[in-house]
Image (cartoon, helix red, strand yellow):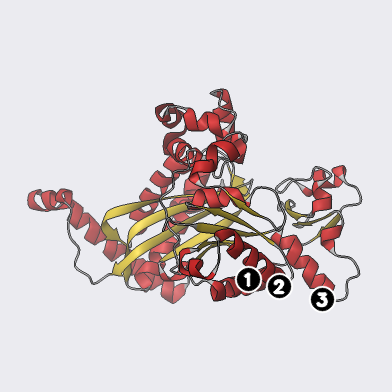
Amino acid sequence: MTQIIFHIDVNSAFLSWSALDKLAHGAATDLRTIPAIIGGDMAKRHGVVLAKSIPAKAYGIKTGEPIVNAMRKCPSLLVEKPDHALYHEKSHELMNLLSDICPDIEQVSVDECYMDYTPISRLFPSPIDAAAHIRTLVYEKLGFTVNIGISDCKVLAKMASDFEKPNLTHTLYSHEIQEKMWNLPVSSLFMCGHSSVETLHKLGILTIGDLAKTDVDILTANLKSHGRLLWEYANGIDDSVVETTPEAAKGIGNSITLSKDAVTTQEACHILLKLSESVARRLRTAGQMAEMISVEIKYNNFKKVSHQTTLQTPTSGSDTIYRISCALLNELWDGTPIRLLGIRSSKLVSAQAPVQLSLFDMSAVSTDDKPSISSRKEAKLEKALDTIRQKYGADAVVRGSLLQNETD
């Protein structure tokens, strides 16, 4: 049987969940039926539109734009603050319900997940029927609607779920991309952020079809590895599978939402240094080392991207994780202002496990042993620092480079 994947996405999740909560507490008006948005505190920098109602969309209000702009478009707009505790609760209810239908799901955010249709295919006449059943059940049990995209690969299922909304099912199989996707503006392609769009437009690439037909070498010359990724997505190439293992069980990571968007490599690497120390310290506390490091970026337009690399030798060293993270950032970042940065370590092994040296390491040991001595010194230093921090607090010892940046 050909692989079939669903992408299930809650329609205007934050607004829908806030609306249901208010109705349950006696509100007379459903936020979904009037011009309304969910947004941050106007007095703080996070004063942007997080979710909008369909009536608000009719005024041209867009997710991610400043609330002050949205108010200019619709002076009568109702603004509600987000309730993240509520959203976490609603997300948990949704994932539990979907898991009862099919256990093979991969949650990728608070309001969306992938589902492998294969285990339940025998229960339904077709994938369309299964999607209709899921949409109906979610609405009847939980009171909100979802869109479902169906495809033979994850990226196309994601694209399909973003087609016309709300409460609809769309297919976008590989053989349908020319008809259904290639005529769309390149800005609508998953993972194609504002900076990438500007670069593509300068190259005369306006639609996803234009991108799909472009020589991949031209794209990599202008957008590095991200250019190849976009070319693959435009051509419906994505061999990733639905990862059903809970993320928390696979690795140790940390992320931070920035108080001010990072717009330079220096700013981003400064944050990565803090995160590297945190992740490395948690690895050492857990008695583990990582064989894979990944960096996650959320741009100020809310698009998320990530990149990862497998290590020849597992590590729990702050400096090593930092160097790798900066290299990944350089390959991944398209220049769009960064709102969130994260580092995740995975493929964990015990710190006591025997380590297989690479040819480089073996050569070094047989000559002057400098890399081996350096590694041992770094491990001893970090062990000593961990002891001090455990006794006197996490901020007892701070890198001079971090102090310098704080005072700049």
Placement of the C terminus among the 4 image quadrants: top right
- Between disc 3 and disc 2, the foreground one is 2
SS type, badge 2: helix
Image disc number at residue 142:
2
Q: Position of residue 288 (x, y in %)?
A: 32, 69
Q: Is residue 11 left or right of residue 321?
A: right
Dot placed on the residue nearer the N-terminal end, 3 or 1 = 3
Query: Is mark 1 in CB contact (under 8 Å) with mark 2?
Result: yes
Res 350 quadrant in image: bottom left
SS type, badge 3: helix
- Name the residue furthest front: 125
Q: Which residue matches tag 1?
A: 94
Q: Which residue matches tag 3?
A: 24
- Between disc 3 and disc 1, the foreground one is 1
Query: Is mark 3 in CB contact (under 8 Å) with mark 1?
Result: no
Q: Is residue 3 left or right of residue 301?
A: left
Measured Cα–Cα span from mark 1 to mark 2: 8 Å
326 in relation to 242, above or below: above
**Residue at left 87%, top 52%?**
77
